[in-house]
Structure formats: structure tokens, C-alpha cells
Image (cartoon, rainbow, N blue to C red):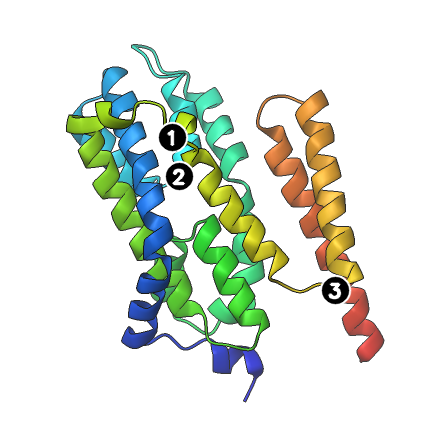
Amino acid sequence: MDTYAAQAKLEAADTWHGFKQLLPLSIFVGAFGLAFGLAASQQGLTNGTIMLMSATVFAGTSQFAVLDMWGTQIPLVPLIITTFAINARHLLMGATLYPWLRYLTPTKRYGIMLLASDANWAMAMQRFHRGERALGILFGGGLAIWSCWMIGTSIGLYFGSAIQDPVSVGLDMVLGCFLLAMTLGGRKNSRTLIIWCVAACSSMLAYWWLPTNSHVVVGALSGGVLGALWMEKAEVAKS
């Protein structure tokens, strides 16, 4: 059986395991949901609009970004461009997960990707590279993060004054430290190091010289393209 196919199974036990694995981190995500609920309500959005945005967009950074554009006249095109730029990394997330997701039905495939975020994607890829089944981490972990994000948003609508500035207590560093730990715990070879360096350098150059949020797209594309080209050459050499 194909290695990818063997790892592309998703059972209820896997989902529950993934939910429990990501739940501790999800609590901190809920704190940001709380901050978003408070900020959005202060911006004048209705409770229904705020909850719908958190439920369907499920992307904290871009949701905070569009709040600065919200008003009686919403600049639709800049709002779309900003949201796309911040979330462009999801294009590469989908590409890296495709070898396993292709064995699922379209309903399951896109249902899982609706819950994909930085944390559960990073942990799932680490498990996949170890030869383990990880769709439960991706789906169950996503459910945990989404649930805490929604709970945090709803609490923020009513009790958000408890944490008006999550940055001041260091909550903004939690997810970044988690992703760094996942990166350091992944594959360690010259290829991976060079790809990360290229992505980091190009992202920093874009941050300094290009429009706001473009560094997300530039860093993701440069690292992703290099990784794809390098992988293709390695496969050709083996064949």
C-alpha cells in the first residue's frame, strides 16, 4: 500500500486524540478570541456579525487587521487584498497536505482544511514526517482551536475588559513559540535549513521594502517554490 494512503486514515479515535493534543494551546488562542470580541464590539459591529466572522473566517490576524478598515463605508478591495495577503500561507499548507488529503472524498478534504491553522498544521506535518497517521491531529486539533476561538470571542463580547491588551501579558508569544518548537522538532538537514533561511530572508526584505503584509506572501512563496523545485530534482535523481 502507498505510504501516503496508509497515513491518510481518519477515525473518531484519531480526532479525539488530536482534540486533546491541541486543547492546552487552544486555551491561549481563546484569550485572543476574547480580545477580538472586545475590539470588534468597540468598533461598532453587532454581536451576530462578530460571531459569524469568527466562525467562518477563523483567522485571528486578518480579523484584527480588517477592524482598522471597518466603518460606515468599507473599502472592499483593500479589505480583500489584506485578508488574502495575511492568509496566503494557507495555499502552501494545502499543497504540503495534498499527498495525504487526495485519498479523502472532497467533502472530508475541504471540511478538514476549513479548520487548518498554523498550530495543527505544524504538528500534523511533524507527525506525517515521522511516518504516523496525523489527520486526527489536523482535524481534531482544528476543532479544539476553533472551539476555543469561538468561546473566547463570545466571552470577549461581554467580559473582554478582563484582558484588554493580551500583548502586555505575553500571550502574543505563545503561538510563535509553539511553531518554533514544531520547526526545531522537525526534519533537520541542509535542505530544510536553506529553505527556511531563504524564506526568512525574503520575508524580512519584503517587510522592509514592500507594502504592508506582503512579507507573508513573499516568504511563503519563496520557501515553498524552492522546496518544491528541490524536491522534484531529488525525485528525478532517484528514478
Task: Work out which residue is located at the far bottom of the displayed protein and give it.
Answer: 1
- The image's mark for residue 19 is none
Where 35 falls versus 101 (above or below)?
above
**Disc 1 secondary structure class:** helix
Q: Which residue is mark 2?
A: 59
Amino acid at circle 2: Ala
Name the image quarter holding the C terminus: bottom right
Image position of 47 (left or right of 18)? left
**Disc 3 secondary structure class:** helix
Cα separation, mark 2 vs mark 3, equals 30 Å
Q: Are marks 2 and 3 in contact (CB under 8 Å)?
A: no
Structural crowding at the residue carrying mark 1, measured as other residues with C-alpha within 10 Å and reported as few (<14), some (14–19) or many (≥20): some
Compare residues 97 and 43 and report the one nearer the observer: 43
Amino acid at circle 1: Gln
Compare residues 234 and 185 and report the one nearer the observer: 185
Q: Which residue is mark 1?
A: 63
The answer to which image quadrant residue 189 occupies is bottom right
Amino acid at circle 3: Met
Where 196 falls versus 22 (above or below)?
above
Q: x%, y% of residue 87?
A: 50, 39
Compare residues 175 and 67 and report the one nearer the observer: 175
Q: Are marks 2 and 1 in contact (CB under 8 Å)?
A: yes
At a point 41% along the width and 36% down the height, the residue shown is 171
The answer to which image quadrant residue 221 occupies is top right
At a point 46% along the width and 44% down the height, the residue shown is 175
Q: x%, y% of residue 47?
A: 17, 27
